[in-house]
Amino acid sequence: MTPIRTETEDGVRSIVLARPERYNTITPELRDALAAAVDEADADPEVRVMLLRADGPAFCAGYGLDWSTEMQAAEDGSDTVWDSAMDYRLMSSFVDVYMKLWYAAKPTIAAVHGWCIAGGTDLVLCSDVIVAAENAVFGYPPARVWGTPTTAMWVYRMGFEKAKRYLLTGDEIPARTAADIGLIAECVPDDELPAHAMALAKRMAKLPGNQLEMLKLLCNQTVENMGFASSRTLGTFLDGVARHTREGRDFVARAGAIGFRQAVRERDDPFGDYGSRPQRTQEG
């Protein structure tokens, strides 16, 4: 089954993450399918705006920890030392795809519901505009161990102080808070998200395509002039470093011993959020 499907309506190309049973976690297959979908939409003269959305209960719960921890466990069990250049190339193969949303000539909107955490934020924060349902939750829990944000969008999105506030704790960010602090553009009731996001995309699509492209380029250039490329390079490299610290290697070993879901729960239990949130709070 393909991890991505597409639909087109009134100049809007919907690119849909379609691994609902896996919470749309990121795999090499999803990476490659997303790259192809964005490139195709950007080259299609009938498309003026791209709308990224997802099937199932979550937008994207990050990288598929099953394959990624297994990959590192195999690496750690070999006789070779960590190859930082190879790691950087591998992670860049994912980051370069996320950045297609940023560097595409046409505007990209993301409609987020449910979990959008860890690597899912690396992906979605590269969209031009993010709207979310009230049930959406953002955050970068690997800040606590085993990662750094590869696309380095946090400071550019919401400023220096707020980025530090949430990255230095790894705390989850409810959608309403995400809108208030500028991480995302808008938060709407859950049942209104699909229609709201599509209406916004169609409203943009009323503009001439060349106007959309020029305005996006103008806005993005400000971020480029603030050193975005070097921040992204450092974020991608440091992500590899974080995964190969003593603590990062211990996390992978623990995941191999008890399963990655339980290892993640142990990491987050002291903070009482994400999957470790008390059940009563989840229902409330």
Image (cartoon, grey):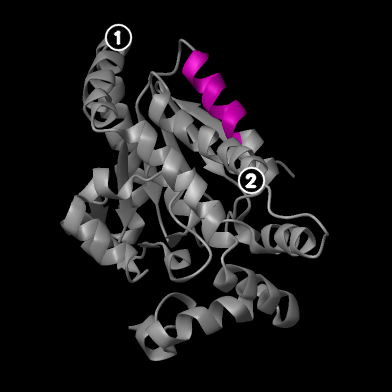
**201 relative position to 12: left or right:** left
Spot the residue most to the right: 79
- Residue 272 visible in the snapshot: no
Taking depth in this image into account, of 260 and 39 the one nearest to the observer is 260
User: x, y (%) of residue 103?
Assistant: 41, 25
User: Which element is circle 2 on?
Assistant: helix
Asked whether residue 10 is drawn in magenta, I would say: no
Tag 1 residue: 210
The amino acid beneath tag 1 is Asn
**240 relative position to 206: left or right:** right
Give above or below for 275 relative to 63.
below
User: For the point 60% across and 61% down, which residue is it?
Assistant: 244
Give above or below for 168 relative to 64.
below
Give above or below for 6 relative to 78.
above
Give the mark, 2 or 1, whose residue is nearer the N terminus.
Answer: 2
User: For the point 79% across and 61% down, which residue is it?
Assistant: 74
**195 relative position to 275: left or right:** left
Q: Real-space Cα distance between discs 2 and 1?
A: 38 Å
Q: Residues within 10 Å of mark 1 (few under 14, many from 20)?
A: few
Magenta stretch mostly in which secondary structure?
A: helix
User: x, y (%) of residue 73?
Assistant: 74, 65
**17 relative position to 133: left or right:** right
User: For the point 42% across and 45% down, which residue is it?
Assistant: 124
Q: Which residues are magenta?
A: 34-43
Taking depth in this image into account, of 228 and 244 the one nearest to the observer is 244
- Residue 257 visible in the snapshot: yes
Tag 2 residue: 87
Asked whether residue 41 is drawn in magenta, I would say: yes
User: For the point 25% across and 55% down, which residue is it?
Assistant: 188
Give above or below for 189 relative to 85.
below
